[in-house]
Amino acid sequence: MDDGLLSQDEINALLSGGGDIGEDSEALSSRDNELLNKVADIFSNAENSVIGMLSGKGVEISLDDAEVLTQGEFREKLPDSPPFLFSATFGGFEDAPLTLAVEQKGGLTLADLMMGGGGTDLPEPSDLYWNAAQEGLSQVVGSAFTSLSSLLGGRRLMPENTGSAVGEDGWLLFATQPEDAKVWVSGANIQIEGLEPFRAWTALPLDSAISLAGLIDEVESGANKKAAAPAPAVGGGGGASGGGVPQAAPVVDVRPAAFQPLDSGGGGGPSSPIDMIADIPVRVTVELGKTRKSVSEILALTNGAVIELDKMAGEPVDILVNGKLIAKGEVVVIDENFGVRITDIIGVGNARAAS
């Protein structure tokens, strides 16, 4: 019966700094929002540093206020352009799921920059470029997890079970959860110097976001208590009264640190952005030639029929990587197998023009 009095749950929500009375019991408290804003800043800083490093350009990122939405409500915010979705789980934190959603033009921009392009003439979507975009976003998550571990008292976090996909009809941020499941989402507008801006979002299931905020709160509360604890008294053997003469601090041997000289060729990290995607498999195809036929001509083909191609005998064949022309060559025979000897490498710009 509604008698105008607050329920115990509503009183508890107010005392804990919770949201408006009558909100869902899973709503974030003001303290949760404060801590999750730190998480949003960490991912924003990771995007800034990683994208800047991969592109070699200045990057500016502005964050929106984080929201709590259902998965369906978030999808409705992007009705005409399903995003590129990068997913991972928090290794070291309950295997909580995480998704980075990026506008498709943003994913292709990042991939093009990683592949040596300028980010202005975007390529057609293909597995090669989506794999590159996945690798770039994986670097963002890895950088963010490194920073986030300090908020969690040094807990070791690793991105696990990574994967990516382009959103299709009915896409969801978290495919294993229902459409009405609530998620915490932090949006960002990313501006790479000289290029068109694009949007990206960091998303966590609401229960995982609340757990993460709670763990950060525990770590910060413990650190505050430790900092507020009185320092132990310094004294000598003065008996039970503790009034002895303070002892002098021990002499400490302090010397400049000595480091081995750095080997210019021994860097452990990738020497260039392309090294970060060097292990991605690609499909190499050799195109002997092509032609056009009508449906009736195709239906009339029989065993022994000859199809004339548009290339002259002895003319170089095309070598394509994931459908993109990258070189020309001549057909050779190696033992009992065909091969291709490359005779001309086509640059990125020329390959796009030729395709």
Image: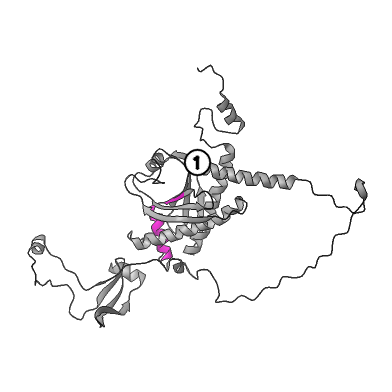
Query: What's the amino acid at mark 1?
Result: Asp
Label 1 Cα crowd, 10 Å radius (few <14 / some 14-19 / many 20+):
some
Determine if the magenta segment contains residue 102.
yes
In the foreground, 84 or 49: 84
Q: Is residue 94 above or below residue 14?
A: below
Q: Position of residue 204 (x, y in %)?
A: 48, 45
SS under mark 1 = helix
Answer yes or no: is residue 151 visible.
yes
Check residue 291 for magenta coloring. no
Image height of 23 relative to 61, above or below: above
In the picture of the structure, the residue carrying the numbered disc 1 is 207
Residue 111 or residue 141, whichever sits in front: 141
150 relative to 140 in the view: left or right: right
List x then y, in percent, for residue 345. 33, 76
Q: Which residues are magenta?
A: 98-115
**Coordinates of residue 352 in the picture (x, y in percent):** 32, 67
Left or right, 53 with reference to 354: right
Q: Determine the residue positioned at 41% across, 59% down.
A: 133
> x, y (%) of residue 97?
47, 48
Residue 73: which quarter of the image?
top left
Q: Is residue 126 left or right of residue 59?
A: left
Q: Look at the picture and state if 74 lies above or below 61.
A: above
